[in-house]
Amino acid sequence: MRFNLGRGAAVVAAALCASAAWAGTASADPEWPTITTITASPDRVAPGASVTYTITVVPDLVSPSTPEPTVGGTVSLKDGSTPIPECQDVTVTNGSATCSAPATLPSGTHYVTAFYLGDEVFSASTSVNPAEVVVYNVASIVGSTAPNPVERLTPIVYTGIVDGIRLTSEGGAPAASYGTVAFEVDGQPIDSCQEQTLMLLTSSATCVTIAPATGGEHTLKVSYSGDAWSTPATHTSTFTVLAPAVSAPASMDFGSVEAGKVSQRSITLTNSGTLPVEVNGVDVTGPFAATSDSCKGKTLAVGATCAVVTTYTPSAVGAQSGSLTFDVGSGIGKRTTALTATGVAAPVPPAPTVTPPPPAPQPGGTFAPGKKPTLTVNAPSSSKPGATPTVQVPLSCPATEECDLSGQLTISTSAFARAAHSAAAGTTKIAHFSGVQVKAGGLKTVKLKLSKAFIKKAQKRGIRRIQATLTVTTVFGTGQQATTKQQVTVLIPKAPKRKAAAKVAPRFTG
């Protein structure tokens, strides 16, 4: 709380101080006395706001016969007895000077005096009256809500507490006005709470009303209007309204479904509010049906869910619609999900596809037709080094396509066994060939090499005829393959006769 002297006493004090502070600053014998005045704009400001001072200095007692001279020199300002740093030795031009300076605390009325310093022509002078500048108190306000949280549509009290207001005016007389407080929620003014009187004992104002109907977080804004001595102020805070609320999909599409088939969807109801809610029932319309229901008769806690499994069975071709409605208590009412689907006719089954029989396999290369299936072994004389027994096999190719032939000549392993062991016989390869190219319808004789050991074994056992199997594998230009087998007879030559050892006549020596 600040008490100030009356204006008259302040003016007298300023003049006395000026006489002492500025004595002897002008010339010893000034020719022209002066009159100084000062004004301030604006004259009511917040702390730190800029104030512009205008000073006028004019000659006094000018002779009518003498033209009024122009005043020059400098002027300085004081806020009470404190010099204003920004307004010292300000140049006076043509009898006028200006300067600007920020308003300073303390709050209340400040008396700013101008001191003209004089010069060789004009005498010093002090402003006739000081400029009055009112510096506001910097007020602040804090808003609060009770109770918080609060249930929707129940009584609620909003409070704004103001700090930094001025409770007395100049000279100790009560201030004429202390300002008012206005309240708004979520940016909307509360009609009955726009100019609430500030209670001096608590420096606060209240607004008693009803909480919003919508649950969730809300914003309270309190605004202090300010008064003749204090600045306006605002403050925002949040509070929570408890309210039941549920959420469900606005729509659900089951897509296109063929006749005779079923499409299924699960539709969830969520307690999205801040109070428990009870689900009284569920209703489904249209070509839809609820096959599973965990909602009816259930009380959902905050954040809890329940679900209804719904199916669609086409009852017609084309777009179809229906709805799923939740009947919810706690004043919420019904929440509906629109259901849509499209019935599609079942497709006509396609005619059975007739698959043509695969083409008959193409015959491959074989033993030349018309040739006797007898292979005579050509066994060169054992006196020829590296000589190998051979047989010549005539091979032919079908007339339709060139072929690549490979194959082998095999005999039963029982060919050299005794009859008792013939049942367990297998096969053994005695010759083979590959990469034989035969033109379409052509004939080619292939010379096959046989093992000497095989020939000797047959000769040793006196076997002259052995039954063998000729296997021919054909690869055609198309990549198709064919395999043929044919029984042939292998003729083994007689073993060469051994030469008798030469007789050596006994030799006698006498």
Image: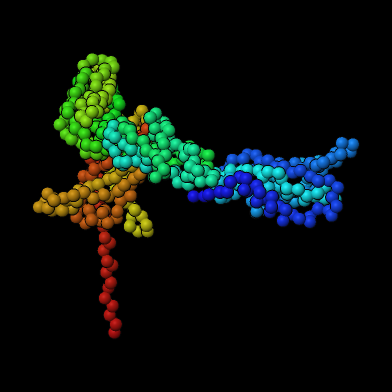
Q: Residue at x 71, y 44 (%)?
A: 128
Q: Position of residue 38 (x, y in %)?
A: 70, 42
Q: Position of residue 262 (x, y in %)?
A: 21, 24
Q: Residue at x 71, y 45 (%)?
A: 127
Query: How is the structure coloured here?
Result: rainbow
Q: Relative to residue 176, is residue 152 drawn left or right?
A: left
Q: Position of residue 332 (x, y in %)?
A: 24, 28
Q: Quadrant of the C terminus?
A: bottom left
Q: Residue at x 37, y 38 (%)?
A: 206
- Does the image show residue 258? no
Q: Relative to residue 250, is residue 133 drawn left or right?
A: right
Q: Residue at x 36, y 35 (%)?
A: 207
Q: Nearer the viewer, residue 465 or 21?
A: 21
Q: Please, is residue 146 above or below residue 463 in the view? A: above
Q: Position of residue 283 (x, y in %)?
A: 19, 23
Q: Residue furthest bottom?
A: 510
Q: To which quarter of the image does residue 152 belong?
A: top left
- Does the image show residue 247? yes
Q: Please, is residue 419 above or below residue 251 in the view? A: below
Q: Nearer the viewer, residue 353 or 308?
A: 308
